[in-house]
Amino acid sequence: MSTDSDTQSEADAREQLIDLAAEFYDQFAGGEVPTMSIPTRTKSNIEYDEEMDVWVYGDRESTRSAKTVSGAQKLLKATYVIDFLAQQLEEDRSSTLRELYYLSESFDHEEAQFNSQDESNQLIEDLEIVSDVRREEFHMRPEESGATVMGPLLIREQTRRGEREIHCQEDVGEGGYQIPNNPDTIEFLDNDADFVLCVETGGMRDRLVENGFDEDHNALIVHLKGQPARATRRLTKRLRDELGLPVTVFTDGDPWSYRIYGSVAYGSIKSAHLSEYLATPDAQFIGIQPADIVEYDLPTDPLSDSDVNALESELEDPRFQTDYWREQIELQLDIEKKAEQQSLAARGLDFVTDTYLPERLDAMDVI
Amino acid sequence: MTSYQSTLAEGEGIAEELAEAQRSISIAEFFEKNRQMLGFDSGARALVTAVKEAVDNALDATEESSILPDIYVEIQENDDYYRLIVEDNGPGITKEQIPKIFGKLLYGSRFHAREQNRGQQGIGISAAVLYSQLTSGKPAKITSRTKGSADAKYFELTIDTDSNEPEIEGEDTTSWDRPHGTRIELEMEANMRARNQLHDYIKHTAVVNPHARLELREPQEHFKFERATDQLPEETEEIRPHPHGVELGTLQKMLDATDSYSVSGFLQEEFTRVGGKTADKVIDNFRDRHFGREMAWSAPATHEDADIESAVSDAVANKGAEATAEFAASIAAEIDDAGSVTHSRVQGIVETVAEGVEEAYATTFGSTVREKAAAAAWGAVSDERTGDIYALVDEATTDRKDDAHVQGLAERVATKFEDEENPHDRLTRDQVEDYVDRAADATEEYDEATFGETAREKVVDAIWGQMSTIPDEPPNITAIDDDRDTASELHEAMRETDIIAPPTDCLSPISDGLVLEGLKKEFDADFYAASTRDASVHGGDPFIVEAGIAYGGDLEESSSADVMRFANRVPLVYQRGACSITDVVKTINWRNYKLDQPGGSGIPNGPAVIMVHVASTNVPFTSESKDAVANVPEIEDEVERAIREAARDLKSYLKKRRSMEKRRRKQDKLATILPEMAEKLQEVTGKGELNIDDSLARIMNNVLVDREHENGTVRLIVENNDDTNASLEITDIVSEDPGEVDGANVVEMDGEYFVKWTPEVKAGTEASIEYRVDGDATFDVQVEGIEDEKLTINA
């Protein structure tokens, strides 16, 4: 990725934003009511795109219209944020979502200020959708990135201080290589990897590294850190698409963790407009599966009410409408139990690397 | 009018009787015993009552002489006593009248007259005189000047508490600045603790008497209430009683006193709203009670044994075969034609047929023959009753009743008619009920059927309906007067008959227009509503209820609404809780009318005044002190309707006001947000200045008036973005002559041209006019017919 094209995409992003503002301007000038239509971002409005193999938004739209006070406030905020982003791009600077939220405090008009960070995050997503420019291209960062990669991979990263070549096993410490906010600034140079293993929890990731799982099995261990950030998902997708590596996901055995898998594989509801760019449709789920709980007789916790609700809601989630998931979820509802990744330690610290993962990966035809 | 009614007030009136009865005890004693009843139970209260009685009298005195009232009330603190002075501009009173009016307790020309007046019992002002005399020992000082007289007369008056007779102590001639009027000065033991009630009384009096000028000067404050209208209340007429309004005792007295011979004459002469037709209706109802009704039976069918024709033939002898045959056949045919007949009807038919046959055959059918024929025909008609009764019972009861049971009941009822004593089948309704009850009881007992209350009632109704009023002459007045039971039958018949409400010219409602004026005069509010109901009757006394509501403005926001009660234009300031008007206000669900009402009942909260006026020839009070209207259902219903009528207007006002407030808030907000957004958009896009008025008008569903002015052509465009149609009155004031304008009128005034255009713009559409002006014309457009909140002028 050259500096030229970078500048190009920045200029494009800025152009797109200003076009959006010009659209509002023209609506006013024509005596019309300024409006902005955005796909409805709910579970009921996502559908499977067979061509892209990912979940995208359906046809339902919600309209932010200046006809209502709340609509007018949203449009005013949008205008202020467009102004801010255009300036930021012009000055080639970046900011975090949280900074934007606090920055709104300095907007001279009270009505333009955000009431919560959810609101500002949502607005950025709205602008992404309407302008067809990704947040990263607006130079908006999430607060914490910090997800890491460990494994036999050599990359070149475009940093503010110039290009760096980094080997994700040899040039990094125990912590691994930190994925930057915009992973598109990374170029893959070389690798010895056989597959990608995405891990939900830090504890399990550290266990795998300590046990040398990456070295033993030529695995690229990606730490998801809970619900994965966009950068992590983007990198995972690039590892799959550009290097042709199979992607596997290893999480806790509870409904929330299935959603983590879901967002890696199918994209999240909130960012379904970017599914094409973020989702790795053929990512495979390792576990912990409800079947594993039974098979390995793992120590468990009982399902709480909210767990049950989440499972039931997943049964209706279009992304989980497969025989595999229906079976697993119904089994879990039946046994009324859940288990953490670390519960495998009940069989000894090496059980996960020596027995569980090899068995599962073998069953999945990954190794 | 030589009716009993007119003598009620004069000679042997109840007032006199009462006064007579009171003379056995000392009047002072009577007063002491009845203080609270008369409104003089405490010093605070006594002062208010005295003011009230004096002012009410003054208002009545002026109005009766068609003088616009100008009343001055002064209260002075005088050592241990208070001195009350009330002056009016009435006609003044003569020496002869003075003792009568001010002295004698219970004197009153209008006691029991059916006319709306303030001082209904004539007890008030004399009680005030007596109270002042008893507490201060000082006489009432009266100054009066009649119209045209040079001087005023001055009297000092006391009441002899033994004889209940007024005595004039001092008498003098004096000068007075009023050209005519009366002034009364009373000294009494009192205090000003009821100052609020006193103020309320005066203020409320001003509200319901917008034609009066009132002034109150008391030791601390001084108020003046000016007139809002020069229109005097309608003069009231005294009316005869309404048939629904008399008690049996009164009716008996009237029967005794009347000169009429017939009931019809009596009813039409002595009562209001009774003409020939209504009298007939009353008399029919009276007949039904007095005589009962006659049962009508259907003519025997061919298969039945009885046969009218042969029965009649057999009953007639020596009249020639042909005439007899014709006679019998005609009677049979007439009865057949009639379907079902009563005994009276049979008699009538026989009479008519006999006349005809007599003429045709030149044979005499004398009364004996006629009687025999009628008896024979009736015998045949009433030979079989079960069938008729069965049909009635079957019709009246539900389909589920067993046929055998219906038959059983019908047979038993029919049997009851075979009473030797009652050959013509005449029954009162009570007797019918008795027949049906006994028959039903028997049917239940022997046939194991059930006939409940409702079924029985329906059967009785059916039979009673089949029976006919007996056309006999009703008893005359003397006969009715002699027999209490008959009088009671007439009384019931009068009550039962539908009679139009009494005339209302005996009432003087304030009228909704003046209620509004009165409220506007005394309360600075944002909204006023008033309603006047049509007259109704309670116990034969007509009454009218009026209600008014004032809302918002300077009215107090934080407390509960102020309820003002009035009876015959007199404010009621005491015993709020005991008054049925208050009860009604409390039971209304004010939340329906957009007022705050904690708990959904009780006096509503908010900046509101609710006034209710009951005008009647006889307002029923809970006590002699006339502070609270008694719970009379008819009055309560009307009070509720009157309040609801006014409240409906309030509701639509508040609804509109709230939606306008909402709209204004929205508009305010958008009016800050959108220009800000426009400014930012100019900044971001680098384009020129934005005019967002049109967008704003669209957003606010506003009516937008826009002007295009190019090359001397002016186009005025109205765009209605609302979802309701707009009827507008648009005046475009142009500095240059626009010539003729298609669709608008042009009027020139002082060198300016007024282009008047009244478009009807449907929801979501636009309308325009076009005209040409030369040079640099200036424009000023004004738009009427739409709320400011909904209008955007961009022209």
Image: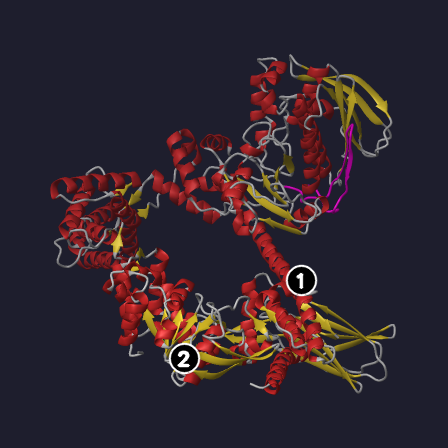
Q: Determine whether, in the image, residue A191 is placed left or right of residue B89.
A: left
- Amino acid carrying label 1: it is Glu
Which of the 4 image quarters holds residue B338? bottom left
Q: How many marks?
A: 2
The quarter of the picture where the N terminus of chain B appears is top right
Q: Position of residue A72 (x, y in %)?
A: 61, 68
What chain is tagged by disc 1? A
Q: Which is more toward the observer, B341 or B739?
A: B739
Q: How far, Cα to Cα, is label 2 from label 1?
A: 40 Å
Q: Which is more toward the observer, A111 or B433?
A: A111
Please give the residue where the numbered disc 1 appears in the rendered image.
A110
Residue for point 26% across, 40% down: B433
Q: Which mark is residue B587?
A: none
Answer above or below: position of A24 versus B160: below
| Category of crowding for the residue at label 2, using alpha-carbon neighbours closer than 10 angstroms: few (below 14), some (14–19), many (at least 20) | many
What chain is tagged by disc 2? A
From where the camera sits, is residue B363 visible? Answer: no
* Circle 2: element type: strand
Which segment is the magenta one? B209-236
Verify whether residue B226 appears in magenta: yes
From where the camera sits, is residue A299 visible? Answer: yes
Q: Position of residue B53 (x, y in %)?
A: 68, 29
Please give the residue where the numbered disc 2 appears in the rendered image.
A54
